Image (cartoon, rainbow, N blue to C red):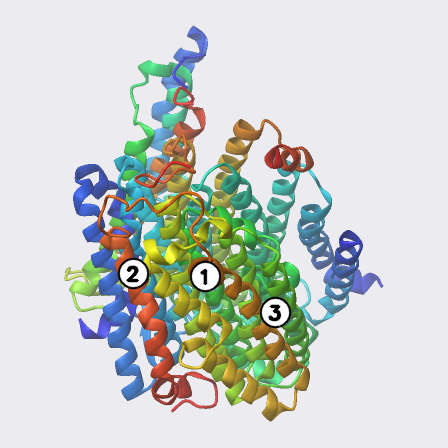
Amino acid sequence: MKELLSQYFIYWLILVLFMIGPFGMIYKKNLVKKLMAMNIMQVAVIIFFLVLGQKAGGTIPIEIHGLTGVEHYINPLPHALMLTAIVVSLSTTGVALALLLLIQRRFGTLEEDEMLRRMNQ
Amino acid sequence: MREQLPALIVIVPLLTALVTPLIAYLSAKLLRAVVTGAILVSNLSAMGALLRVLAEGPWHYRFGGWAPPWGIEYVIDPLSGGMAVLISFISLVVAVYSGPFLKEDTWLRKGIFYALYLLLTAGLLGMVVTGDAFNLYVFLEISSLAAYALIASGGEKATVAAFRYLLIGTVGASFYLLGVGYLYSVTGSLNMADLALRLQPLTESPAVMTAVLMLLVGMAIKMALFPLHGWLPDSYTYAPPPAAAFISGVMTKVSAYVLLRFFFFVFSAVSGPVPAALTVLGWAAAVGIIIGSVMAIAQSDFRRMLAYSSVAQIGYIVLGLAIGNMYGLIGAVLHILNHAVMKSCLFLVAGGVKWKTGEHTIEKYAALCRQMPLTMGAFLIAALSMVGLPPTAGFFSKWYLALGAIEAGMWPYIAVIVLSSLLNAVYFFRVIEHVYMKKAGPKPAEASGSGMELPAAMLLPIVLLGVGILVIGILNESIVTQILQYAIPGGGR
Amino acid sequence: MNRRFGTIVLGTAFRFLVPFIMVYGMYVLMHGEYSPGGGFQAGALFGIAVVLDRLVQGEEAMLSISGTKAVILAGIGTFIYGFIGVLTVLLNGNFLEYGVFPLDMIEGERHALGILGIEIGVTICVMATIIAIFDALTRREEW
Amino acid sequence: MTRFISFFGLGLMTLMLFITTSGLPVLFDPESPAALHVSPRYIEKSHEETGSPNFVTAVLADYRGYDTLGETTVIFTAGLATVLLLRAARKDSDRIPGGKEE
């Protein structure tokens, strides 16, 4: 059990974080909370990739003079990919906040039930 | 320059989009010509690439000159080339159509609308031609963000619809990215061809099974497959007409294409979890076809009816994938083509009617055949094609699907196809009846002043797509034997 | 945000801070190849410098760019990136193949030059987008 | 009812995800496929090939430079979207110019 924990436990943590996304999307009625659930989900994916890039005994992926060899540096590819993913996540959040601002101005609420009621009036 | 054609398909609309706000600021008149020109160049490049691919086999383009597993490559094969031609063509038609809708806007709104429109086009094209799983995600997000913004610009209710679409769409994209992460963790590669190679010994691995599930859920959300279609009706209903026509025409189909690409090219070794996933997909699609059609009957808003019909139609495409033999796949790909043209045409008609009468409810379509004969002619063709009557395009894709289902011995699917055709007939004949049979309401058609039924820029695309449906229907055999036969897996050269 | 909310202390402090942030942004941009950093981070720093200035100085901000102009600038920034790619295509290379620049350098240096070029484009885009979003979120009089 | 079904589905999915973690490489394994297949070239050759001792920058801006163009475009798209929604919205955006009044 202890071995299993040391080998996989971060994955479990990431999956819990990841599943917060869909669960929050369904069971939270406040739009801001839904947005937060979405963000947590994206962060979980980012952590997942970064964990994949990690190596025991590796240092940051910037060349140190005199230190050559693949095993001394952690995998740079997930880091590069996740820089992109972070930016995507930031952009999505920005657009979502702009939409929330509009919804707040037009309907005066961010609670989903209340909003739907006012929309159908 | 000829060697650069695959890059031009995406780069030209992308780079034009970047300077579109500047062009709008300098000269709003030039704007439409530039935008249309950029999409035209993209369309011509796609056609050129497709022709060469049909003659010489798949074409690989390396970005930055780096060899595939390390760099990003574009792969044009008959399937992706054909999709690129389709997307850029629909985009071109809708770009022409969108002109009158933006006439009275400020330069800022015009510029941003066209920039987002070009970004949406470039994003979808990039998703289709790329050979790299992560590059696909980046372009997926470009197209999605542009689509959210375009939908949200349609008014009050559209904002809510766009926000919901944003949340659900991002969940879908996250699922896709996590799926790619699982694949990366067991193979160490992101290139699709390389992935296919390195997945062969791993088909029984639980991580691959999870990856299949993740990609399935992610793309099912993005293409609004039945239990996950919640975002679609509102988005399509409240989006501004040009955006609705383009988004409804191609966006969900591109996700279906991605699913096809992954399931039949990347996970091409057919052992392991893929057949099980396809079976689940098939049943979801079958239920979705019936429920989408039934919901469409219940609607009184024309656009909402079309939106529910989209849920049903995406089911056909997935059904073809689930059948999985040659006829099934041909039917699926042919239906991607047909449905893109038909649904765009119908949404263009809806926008035209809104322009003329300011109404969207089906009741107000009464006796429109006098006021707008050409538009309603195109509508009639598109509607008959949706129902699936023989000379039109829609018949042939259903025919191939049915052939595939018979060959695979999947009788329930045939029942679903026949039943849904009847349901389609019910809701489309209701509209046709209003258009052609009903007397005009209390308000007599006051011989409207402007001689044309619609501005030429709007009428032309509608008629073009209407004729296109007939042409595809008549030429379907040569399309299948010349292009699609090589496009589906196992039929290539 | 048209009204300044800074008191005299805040105003003076930030007037000192803003140039330093900009210099730091420049450093992050130029040094991105050798240490953590690069276009995005530098763009964020530049954007923050402008936003801080706007927050503290209000209307009198020296670095005032309106949101609509910022959008155009963001497009141009990204276009610089794309244009370097187009340049490599015109020089008979593939898109973004920096090795084809006709310069008398070793391969690595030509690539480094290309990287610096695209990082400048990214910096401009990120900076302008931050300003545009800030401007859109804070301007209310049109409503 | 729908809530119950979705809860059930999501719960099932979570369970499956937990079970299938055993297929993933062990944490921080220097021998994992990701560490052995594509990335070694970036670590060994990038200084020579791209002139950048920072491997992440080399991958981001050179080997996968096209992704970064897409990424920059995403930011630009977000800026456009925000300005469109908050600065350039029509007051009466349901109406279509030129079309008849409702």
Find residue C26 and name its label.
none
Pointers 2 and 1 within a single chain: yes
- Per the image, label 3 sits on a secondary structure element best described as helix
Q: Is residue C89 visible?
A: yes
Q: Is residue B308 above or below residue B322?
A: above
Earlier sequence position, callout 2 versus callout 1 = 1
Earlier sequence position, callout 3 versus callout 2 = 3
Q: Position of residue C64 (x, y in %)?
A: 30, 23
Pointers 3 and 2 within a single chain: yes
Q: Quadrant of residue B143?
A: bottom left
Residue toward you, B326 or B407: B407
Return the residue found at the far right. Answer: A1
Disc 2 crowd, CA 10 A, few/some/many (<14, 14-19, 20+): many
Question: How many numbered discs sit on the rendered protein?
Answer: 3
Q: Which residue is mark 1?
A: B437
Distance in Å between CA atoms under marks 3 and 2: 29 Å
Q: Quadrant of residue B483?
A: bottom left
In the picture, measured across the screen, residue C83 lies left or right of residue A54, that is left
Proximity of marks 3 and 2: CB atoms separated by less than 8 Å: no
Disc 1 crowd, CA 10 A, few/some/many (<14, 14-19, 20+): few
- Per the image, label 2 sits on a secondary structure element best described as helix
Distance in Å between CA atoms under marks 1 and 3: 29 Å
Identity, as a three-letter code, of the amino acid under mark 3:
Ile
Disc 3 crowd, CA 10 A, few/some/many (<14, 14-19, 20+): many
Q: Which residue is mark 3?
A: B289
- Write down the chain letter for disc 1: B
In the picture, measured across the screen, residue B88 lies left or right of residue A73, that is left
In the picture, measured across the screen, residue B109 lies left or right of residue A110, that is left
- Per the image, label 1 sits on a secondary structure element best described as loop
